[in-house]
Image (tube, grey):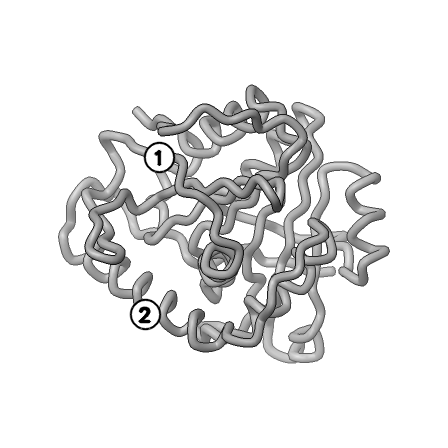
Amino acid sequence: MVEIRLNKSIDFKGMTFVEGFPGAGLVGPMTISYMIEKLKPVYIGYIEGDELPPIMSVHSGTPMPSIRLYYSKEGRFVCILSEYSIPPELVYPISDKIIKFVRDGGFSEIISIGGMPVRDGDEKYLDTVFSISSNDKCAARTVKMGMKRVNEGVSTGIGAVLMLKSVEDKIDNINILVPVRDGITDPKYAELAIQNINNLMKLEIDVTELEKEAKMVEAKINELIEKNKSAHQTLKGEPDQAGPSMYA
């Protein structure tokens, strides 16, 4: 059973919930990790569950859960960082808990960050950031900020499930999708995502040191993914890193 455990009592009303689970190009984890590095949000909790991979992270000598929640009072957001790919059978249980957490906490919106693999011949889109929105109001915001709205396509993973649930529950939700090359992780992906996060959330995240941080995140997550696969523990299938496939 999947649960969200908090170690602090916080009023989340009106805040933004930001997620970026591992997927194509590792855009989400690179972006979330850099937000944590630069804005110094407070660690407030984690996701636990009997079926989650038995993986622990160690940071500055401190053992920590590998799916953690951070809170920024100044930035008015909560973000979630996962240091391993989510097994397919846990996508719905985790998504259900997140949407309940957002709804019960009175959050104003969800922002998801992910990569969008480009097809051969579509390299012209590599500098374009795409978006999917749960309603016309959110779509108008993204278009105004220069994102290209996805009109036709397919999306997968936790971000996709959260979007469907947001439409059903009438929650404001924006998916930021950065085009990525197959099998390539590039700090530029996170830079494009952060530029749009800054605009949407009125933040001022400096991307000067992004390349160094992104490479460290990439190495860490790839290491955990490989350990996850080799252990053959709790996993019923390969983690889905394909990410969404979009045709705008």
Give the position of the N terminus as an image quadrant.
top left
Instruction: First in sequence, mark 1 or 2: give its number.
Output: 1
Q: Position of residue 38 (x, y in %)?
A: 51, 61
Q: Is residue 10 above or below residue 157?
A: above
Q: Position of residue 194 (x, y in %)?
A: 62, 62
Question: Taking the image as drawn, is residue 160 in sight?
Answer: no
Report the residue marked by disc 2: 219
Q: Is residue 18 left or right of residue 89?
A: right
Separation of marks 1 and 2 at Cα, in angstroms: 22 Å
Q: Nearer the viewer, residue 157 or 129?
A: 129
Q: Judging from the image, what secondary structure is the residue with disc 2 in?
A: helix
Q: Residue at x 68, y 58 (%)?
A: 198
How many marks do you count on the picture?
Answer: 2
Q: Amino acid at mark 2?
A: Ala
Q: Position of residue 226 (x, y in %)?
A: 23, 62
Q: Residue at x 19, y 43 (%)?
A: 54
Question: Taking the image as drawn, is residue 31 in sight?
Answer: yes
* Other residues around mark 2 within 10 Å, as few (<14) / some (14–19) / many (≥20): few
Q: Is residue 107 left or right of residue 50?
A: right
Q: Which mark is residue 47?
A: 1
Q: Position of residue 30 (x, y in %)?
A: 47, 63
* Location of residue 102 (image quadrant): top right
Q: Residue at x 35, y 36 (%)?
A: 46
Q: Judging from the image, what secondary structure is the residue with disc 1 in?
A: strand
Q: Is residue 46 left or right of residue 174?
A: left
